[in-house]
Amino acid sequence: MVSDEVASSQGTLARAGETEGEVAVRASALGRAFGDLVALRDVSFELAAGQTLAVLGPNGSGKTTLVRILATLLRPTEGGVEVLGAELPGRAWRVRGRIGLVGHEPLLYRDLTVAENLAFHSRLHRVEGAAERIAELLAKVRMERRAGELVRNLSAGMAQRVAVCRAVLHRPELLLLDEPRSHLDPEAAAMVEPLIGRESGLTRVVVSHDVGAALAESDRALVLAAGGEVAYEGSAGGVSPGDARAAYGGRP
Amino acid sequence: MSAFRAILAKDLLVELRTLQSVPAMALFALTTFVLFRFGLDRESLEGSLAAGVILATVLFAAILAVNRLFVAEREEGGFDAIRLAPVDPAALFVAKAVALVTYLALLQALALPAFGFLFLDDWAGLLPLAGVLLLADAGIAAVGVLVSAIGVNSRARELIVPLLLLPLLVPVMIAAAGAAEPLLAAGGPDYDGVGRWIAMLALYDAVFGAIGYAVYDFLLED
Amino acid sequence: MFRVRLLSLRNLALASVALLVGAFALVFFYAPNDADQGFVQKIFYLHVPLALCALGGFIAAAVHAIRHLRSGDPVHDARAYVSIHISIIFGLAVLVTGSIWARASWGKWWVWDEPTLVSFLIVFLLYATYYPLRFAIEDRDRQARYASVFAITAGAFVPLNFIAVRMAESLVHPRTFATAEGGMPGEMWLTFAVAIAGMALLWATLVRFELVAKSARARISKVRRALDAEATGASRSRIAPTVPSRAGAG
């Protein structure tokens, strides 16, 4: 398509996500070490816009590290990575604000209310029409009546729902989801599905311990072994849940 | 600019709700005054002695606030939230510095009258003293935000902060005391020679404000 | 390829020994005795150059730290670390010689009236926190970065502190050492100049020596790792930065 060529010839400022086939995330021999500890080693993959990548592996295999690098919170010590057309870490400022992260922590201030937290994030991201957007999102996760409650008083599941709202508040193009359904019962998980699930249509990187479910909803898969090495990288259909779980076996 | 205001408003709101800094500082100041009152066994103070008492108290109280400046960010993963947003890291530095100045100013609003009651015969010097202290607060804030950010990621944070902060604040102490001494003189405030100390404070504020602004990015990275 | 660099460790060491011996000779046989303080004043030729080199070293560390933050290259962090290390050792010597001088001149081991000594003590106390700071941060990368931020802040602090203390003391005790400014005869100036030059070279020699030693240790442990041998216990310092092999240069 002509628009593809124009977009790619404009180089790194091309906005991914609108055109089919644009590469949203590209990692090349990515590595990260913390002193002597190697968390990630030689990770390479490509993720096209609109697709979902499942990141699987046992604890300590570097999944969270990978997500944090993609979120521009951590810089790689080896190799390179390009997110939404911007090379990290140098061009990180170009993509901040276009990424939504749901991590292990809800990133909410416990002494502020739900509404105050979301208002704060909307101001940081300069979201237009913030009040309506916040109301709309809270309604979707059925937290609108708890908007005035302190986060400290919420259950873990409720906080997670608000965290999801926080992550999509600024209409990101890329979602980085590190076990997003933790603390969520099936009903709550269904609430957040349209926001961060496959039906959102957004490019997603999902870390999950539920191997079968993750593979079922993904286009591509990256399986990491202990020590941050790649055990499998390719289409999600190309690896069975059993093989993926084998990476958990603790082989050296 | 909006990020700076958002972060400052958030900080002040959290402080209002949790009251974790200002009341502790005020209580500390009051207790210290009482200690000095009995320790020095004097009914009234003036000049360099009075200056020393008020400044030492303010400085040590400041440590309490500096220790707690980034605790919310640290505990709630708040650094991530701010770093994920398209926000200049310097906005965080300035917002936290202004918040710290606010807490210190509130402390002084409470502590200066108490100081006057307990130690001063003549209150005329208190208002200009408040001005000098405000200038000193800016210096404390510039260095305090840096030290607090360094400390928040260290072990033994409660030890590292005063260890780093106190030597760095010695020029502030010297200059503020130099200005305060004539202001608290026995016969009423004497404005002679105060100017050079104000200039010193302003220089300190400018230098460390600029440095903090420049290096803050590096403290925020992972 | 063996290139004998002008600034090689051996040349530096030789030059500093030569200058220091020369200064020593000048101090004892050439410089006149001070009118007020007599022979004791000669400790000035040791004390002041030590102080100037220590302070210069702290500034140098700040410069290395700036380069470290800008480039991310750990070489500069290593240089900053070693600069501060040697300067602190010099600083300790400054305080000791200053104390001896005070004792000999005024009968007291410490004087609060002397602005340079007091200002120096504060600077020394500040830089002494460099070690607990490094020790308190576990992640090496972050440790180096934070240490650099500290080195820059402290480097800016040195002149400010000196000004402040000077201003404070000049009000109370206008007396200054006649030998430190004005009124110094030519022979004293020459001796002083040689002493400073020798001390500066000594500082540079010690810094270079430590960098080379660290670099050699790093190379040894690299070889050991490659041979799968056990790492030596001595090289497992938690705070001293591991020095890449080219840190000894430049």
Image (tube, rainbow, N blue to C red):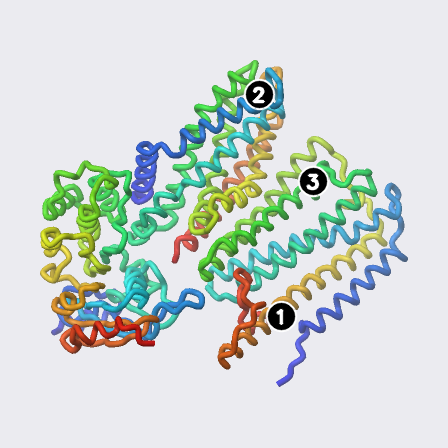
Q: Is B61 rendered above or below residue C227?
A: above
The reply, left or right, for residue C114 in relation to residue A63 is: right
Q: Position of residue A220 (x, y in %)?
A: 18, 72
SS for callout 1:
helix
- Judge if badges 1 and 2 mark residues of a common chain: no
Mark 3: secondary structure: helix
Q: Is residue B177 left or right of residue C187?
A: left
| Along the viewing direction, whichever of B105 and A140 lies nearer the viewer | A140
The amino acid sitting under disc 3 is Pro
Q: Which residue appears at 13% of the width and 59% of the height?
A: A197
Label 1 and label 2: CA atoms lie apart by 56 Å
Q: Disc number at residue C115?
A: 3
Query: Mark 2 — residue?
Result: B37
The x, y position of residue C130, in whole percent, is 56, 52
- Eyeballing the image, is A122 above or below A8? above
x then y, percent, for residue A69:
31, 63
Question: Label 2 lies in what chain?
Answer: B
- Which part of the image, by quadrant, shows the C terminus of chain B? bottom left
For disc 1, the marked residue is C213
